[in-house]
Every structure is written in C-alpha cells, then in structure tokens.
Amino acid sequence: KHCFSRGADGYLYCEGVRVEDAMVLRNFAAYREALQGLRSVVGYAVKANNNLPVLRLLRELGCGAVLVSGNELRLALQAGFDPTRCIFNGNGKTFEDLKLAAESGVFVNVDSEFDLEDIIRAARATGKKVPVLLRINPDVDPQVHPYVATGNKTSKFGIRNEKLQWFLDSIKSYSNDIKLVGVHCHLGSTITKVDIFKDAATLMVNYVDEIRAQGFELEYLNIGGGLGIDYHHTDAILPTPMDLINTVRELVLSRDLTLIIEPGRSLIANTCCFVNRVTGVKSNGTKNFIVVDGSMAELIRPCLYGAYQGADFLGKDRELPTPDEGADFLGKDRELPTPDEGAGLVVHDAGAYCMSMASTYNTKLMPPEYTIQ
Ligand code: LLP
C-alpha cells in the first residue's frame, strides 16, 4: 500500500492531491513559464528551506541553488545540484568555505576587497580557477522592512560604483585564478513592486556594458530573489514571476545575457504550515491568550520583523475570521474562537524562513519536519 494512485482523469494523485498541482510544482512552473524565451537559471535560495527532500525536488525540477555557507553548499551537493548552476554568496564567507566552493566548481560572488583576496587564495590553494560574479550594490530601495533590505546604499552587501574599476583591474590581474562571468545584485526580500527590479536591471545592464567594454566576457546577469507572497491571503493582486520577468526581459535580451534569479520564499513559503498543539487558553484582564506548544524558537518571523502569518485550527468548524494583525508570539490581536485543549493550530506559509531560522531557544528541541511526496 502506498499513497499514490491514478485518478479517473488519468493523472497521478498523492493522498487526494494531483501531483502536478502540488504547490511547489506550481510555484516553480510559474517561474519556468515566465522565463521562456530567455536563457536562465533559477537558483533556489537554500536559506529559505534547507530540507533535503525539498532540495532534491527543486533540483529535479531544474533549479540551481544559491548558497551562503559551507554547510548549505554541502547540502546542495548532497541533493545533487549541478555546481555550475550554484552560486556561493555572502559577505562573510570563510576561507575554509571558499576552498570548498573553489573545489566544487560553484560560482562565487565577490562582495568586498577582502573577499576577493580570499577567493584568490582559495583558488590557489585548490588549484582551481574560480568563476566569479561581482555583487554590485545598486542603491535601489526595495521598500520593505529594513531588516530584509539589502541593495540600498547603507547596506553591507556588494560593492559600490566608485570601487568598480579597482575590482575590474584586480580581477584582470588575477586572471589565472579567477574568471569574471557575471554581475549580481539582490535588492531585498518580500518585494511587492516589480518596477524596482526594472530599475535595478537597468543599472545592471549599464554595468554589463561598461565591464564588457573592458574586454570581459560577461555571460550572467543575476538580479537576486525577493519576490513577496500574499501572507494575508487577501487575494491582493501581487506581482507574479511573469510580472517580474517581463519587466527585465527586454533588457536581458538586448545584451544577450543569461538571467539568474534567486527566489526562496516565492517557491516554498506557501507549501508548508507550522503545526502547533493548543496547550490551553487563559486571559489576563481583557486580553485572551491561546497558548500553544510552538513559539519564537520555531517561528521567529512575527517577533523579528513584526511579520504577519495567517493561522487556522486543524479541526473542522474552527475557521478563523480574517485576522487583523500578527515578542514571544505567533500572532497578535487576532479574533479567534476558543479552542479545546489539545486542538491543532496551524500557522500558514511557514515553508520559508521558519524551520531554517528555528533555534533551540529555551532549550527546546528542533521540531520534526514532515514532507508529503
Ligand atoms: N538571494 C540572496 C542574495 C538573498 O540574500 C536572499 C535572501 C535570496 C536570494 C532569497 O530571497 P527570497 O526570494 O526568499 O525573498 N529572514 C527573512 C528573509 C531574509 C532573506 C535574506 N536573503 C524572513 O524571514 O522573511
């Protein structure tokens, strides 16, 4: 006995869900369709969710991977990702991790002078020539929570325009050790206005022109990740991957580039929920509390960013009215019916930055993860 069956419509079903309709497949298909007609790499941002079966699935669908630590790189290799479709990114990469990156043949983003120096050292230590992208800080405001904005001028990421020439000269003089293959920018996360990507891509293709004019054979334009999702379930008209890609399509084609995008949240967030058990219900004065066994240890986004994630009870007849707002709490000031002790409460859209940011705070154990495949 297993959970797969062929439906009357001829499609494969898994526990009542048409496999083709599984959310993660639909999320990926939205990018694949949007990218038709372009040479492209969808680099899944492993930081969003590093669950191995999830990684394997995304790799099978055709994703590359965006990595920010040696362990993410190890996981990606274990999941079978093609190193030439992986990018090692970050502004504090360690020398040990850079050696692993050089050894495995992934692309490496150059973030600073010291980073470049370390990448060259890693290339020499391993005897490999490292393909690199220059991470440029385009100074475009993504209009998101300041903690997830990464491409404005006060951000710690990437290099600024005035230093570009220094980097190009240095890269040229180490052409036995590294090869510049592209430029990268990442504006921020939870972005809901795609014009911002167009602004950034416009600046970036100007850099491409300038860099190519100096004899570099640039192939890749990486515009990062960051597309937001509808956490409020209001069916708000948010931009889709198609909207995003359409704003940059002509620019990419006009320079004959391969486009890299790095989605995390928009591929995986809405495919998972965080399951809690109600421990009890209490009130302090006029304020009522539903106490659950989950906490900021497992899902820190509401506390860290004031982020909103919907909640629902598992049992029937327990639908929650649309809540109005969400620092150890999972949601705040929500109108909820009184649950029974032991009832299941789920927090939605927990596929991204939930488990991957979970901690053992309060000496709790990491929660188990279940995947339906
Ligand atoms: N590429 C780079 C270079 C990144 O830094 C990130 C995310 C991504 C891609 C993927 O972004 P996404 O498509 O998932 O928005 N902890 C925060 C999110 C921080 C994201 C940091 N970088 C949260 O819980 O919302």
Image (spheres, helix red, strand yellow):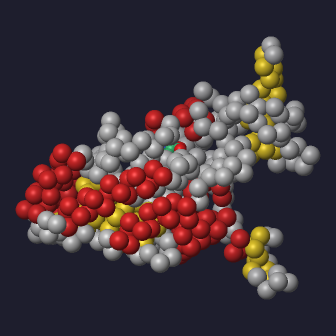
Q: In the current view of this chain or complex, which residue is farthest to the bottom? A: 10
Relative to the observer, which residue lies in front, 194 or 163? 194
Let me know if residue 164 appears in the view.
yes
Q: Quadrant of the C terminus?
A: bottom right
**Residue 324 is drawn in which quadrant?**
top right
Q: Is residue 98 visible in the rendered structure shown here?
A: no
Q: Residue at x 66, y 31 (%)?
A: 329
Q: What residue sits 76% from the left and 32% below the top?
A: 334
In the image: residue 263, left or right of residue 214: right
Q: Quadrant of the N terminus?
A: bottom right
- Compared with 159, 262 (above or below) is below
Residue 30, image x, y percentages:
59, 68
x 38%, y 53%: residue: 200
| Left/right of residue 40 with respect to residue 303 in the rendered view | left
Image point (59%, 33%), residue name: 306
Residue 201, percent from left and from top: 38, 58
Q: Examine the image and state in which quarter residue 371 appears.
A: bottom right
Q: State the residue lying farthest toward the left.
A: 173
Which residue is at the far right? 317
Viewer-side residue, 369 vs 176: 176
Q: Residue 51 in the image: x percent, y percent?
A: 55, 59
Single out the residue that lies furthest toward the top.
285
| Front one among 111 and 258 | 258
Q: Is residue 252 above or below residue 369?
A: below
Number of numbered discs? 0
Residue 108, percent across and down?
28, 61
Look at the picture and state if 262 lies above or below 105. Answer: above
